Amino acid sequence: MDVLNRAISKYMPEDSPRVAIDSHPRLSGIMDTVNSTLAHGPKTRLPSSFYDTRVLEIIDKIGTEEWFSGYKESEEYRKLGIGALVGDVVTRMVGSVEGSGNDGLLEVAGMNGDLGKGRGGEGAIKLGMSGCHDTTLAGILASLGAFENEKWPPYTSHIAVELFRDESLKTEPTKHPIETAPRQGFLGYARKASKPSSVIMRKQTQDLTPEEKAKLQGYFVRLRYNDRPMTIPGCRLPGKHLEGHESFCTLEAFKAIADKFTPRIWTAACMQNLDEPAFPATPEPAGF
């Protein structure tokens, strides 16, 4: 921090003269401003000392540690910070395997307003896209143990969570009947709502029956960050990945890792351990 103060503290306001994590502006705010000017051209640039290589390295290191180290060290941190979103992704992948509509099909409204069918008549979802923040991307990666020695996500960063099927096993999605029932829709008009029969959804991996686990066999998950395949630590173990390709995690192993920090009731989890230390007494490494 002394290096930063020698370089840029002269530009800080009088009521907060030293650069600090919680200064005004915060160090993360300074980092955002610097990164924004780098992305928008020379006319927006700050004084040259903000772009010194050593200054940029220190700002990035402190920023990533402040915002994302908690995901690496605490299961509760992962659960409250990003677990619900990761759980949604897993639910969609398992829904695709089961053919239950939980791949996102139940959320799509067709041309006639019916749920459960795409506007082009699609009967399954092959691609889902969501917009998010840089902190969301790094939170997901860190929670899966795939953000070691990484810098703050640059502009236009993206994650792809890909689901593959081993065609040699000739596995096919199990089609579950989808029942429809009247539902009160927007402005009170009745519309159909699709409701799947009993399926896996967010059922914990350790609670799955042998028949349910068998549905997941032959499927693999790959995590890509800015088009780079990332390897999840727990997927390096024997039997947890496609033979010869550690970045291809078995769906069962990926789900088991995600299940550990997917909250069952997020609001209830937020109210737990309020008087406990922020970090666990024993290590709870991410990605296992």
Image (cartoon, rainbow, N blue to C red):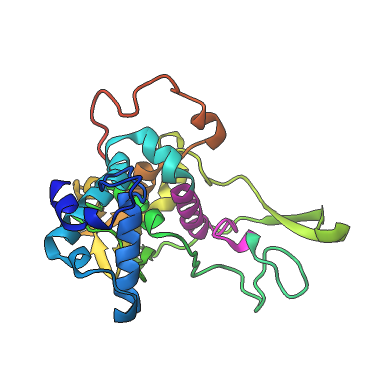
Q: Decide whether residue 99 is among the magenta residues.
A: yes
> Residue 193: image x %, image y %?
74, 57
Where residue 187 sits: x, y (%)? 85, 60
Q: Which residues are magenta?
A: 85-106
The x and y percentages for residue 74 are 32, 34
Q: Is residue 239 visible?
A: no
- Main secondary structure of the magenta stretch: helix
Which residue reaches farthest front?
Answer: 14
The residue located at (36%, 55%) in the rendering is 29
Residue 60 occupies quadrant: bottom left
Nearer to us in this view, 1 or 95: 1
Query: At x 30% / y 58%, what residue is drawn?
Result: 31
User: Which residue does the image show at 27% across and 51% down from the upper left?
Assistant: 63
Total numbered labels: 0
Q: Return the x and y of residue 236 as percentages of the image width and height.
A: 19, 50
Q: Is residue 224 left or right of residue 262?
A: left
In this view of the protein, which residue sits in the foreground, 173 or 258? 258
Question: In the rendered image, which quarter contains the C terminus?
Answer: top left
- Asked if the stretch drawn in magenta spans residue 5, the answer is no
